[in-house]
Amino acid sequence: MPQYPVIDKVKTGKQLKQLIKNKGYTIKDIQQYLSLSCIQTIYRWFDGINIPSVDNLYALSVLLQVPIDRLIIGNKEEDSRYTLMKCLNNRQKRIWTYFLYMNENAVS
């Protein structure tokens, strides 16, 4: 029987922090964008204490221009972003890897 999927709060927090940093947003920017009353909420996400609500995940995915599943890290064995790699030839893998690199390091 497959393992029950759960969200890894710590890894998800690190992912959120990195994506926000890569896009050049500050914690204050995120607080204002999401209309959060307390900046500590975001720090709790980053520390893996809590995770954003579905509404906030959706809003962050729009702001950061990434799919919601890119914001969430679970306990599944492999990252779905790289599942495609198994089906590609070497040239396609290089192009896909380059695309992922450019997407993660894009300057807004």
Image: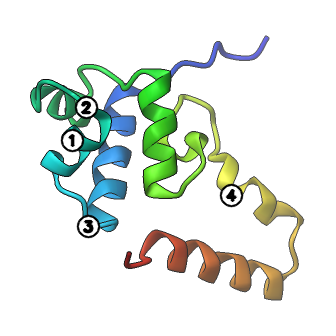
First in sequence: mark 1 vs mark 4: 1
Residue type, numbered disc 4: Tyr
Mark number, residue 32: 1
Q: Nearer the viewer, mark 1 or mark 4?
A: 1
Query: What is the x, y in percent for residue 17?
Result: 28, 49
Please report contact status of discs 1 and 2: CB closer than 8 Å, yes or no: yes
Q: For the point 44% across and 77% down, which residue is it?
A: 106
Q: Nearer the viewer, residue 57 or 73?
A: 57
First in sequence: mark 4 vs mark 3: 3
**Alpha carbon distance from label 1 to label 2:** 5 Å
Mark number, residue 99: none
**Alpha carbon distance from label 4 to label 3:** 25 Å
First in sequence: mark 3 vs mark 2: 3
- Residue placed farthest to the bottom in the image? 91
The residue that mark 4 highlights is 82
**Alpha carbon distance from label 3 to label 2:** 19 Å
Query: What is the x, y in percent for residue 71?
Result: 48, 43
Asked if residue 29 lies left or right of residue 60, the reply is left
Mark number, residue 35: 2
What crowding class fits label 4: few (fewer than 14 Cα within 10 Å), some (14-19), or many (20 or more)? few
Q: Nearer the viewer, mark 2 or mark 4?
A: 2
Mark number, residue 24: 3
**Alpha carbon distance from label 1 to label 4:** 33 Å
First in sequence: mark 1 vs mark 3: 3
Q: Which type of secondary structure does the marked residue at label 3 adopt?
A: loop
In the depicted structure, whether residue 52 falls above or below residue 91: above
What crowding class fits label 2: few (fewer than 14 Cα within 10 Å), some (14-19), or many (20 or more)? few
Q: In the rendered image, which quarter contains the N terminus? A: top right
Q: For the point 82% across and 62% down, which residue is it?
A: 86
Q: Nearer the viewer, mark 3 or mark 2?
A: 2
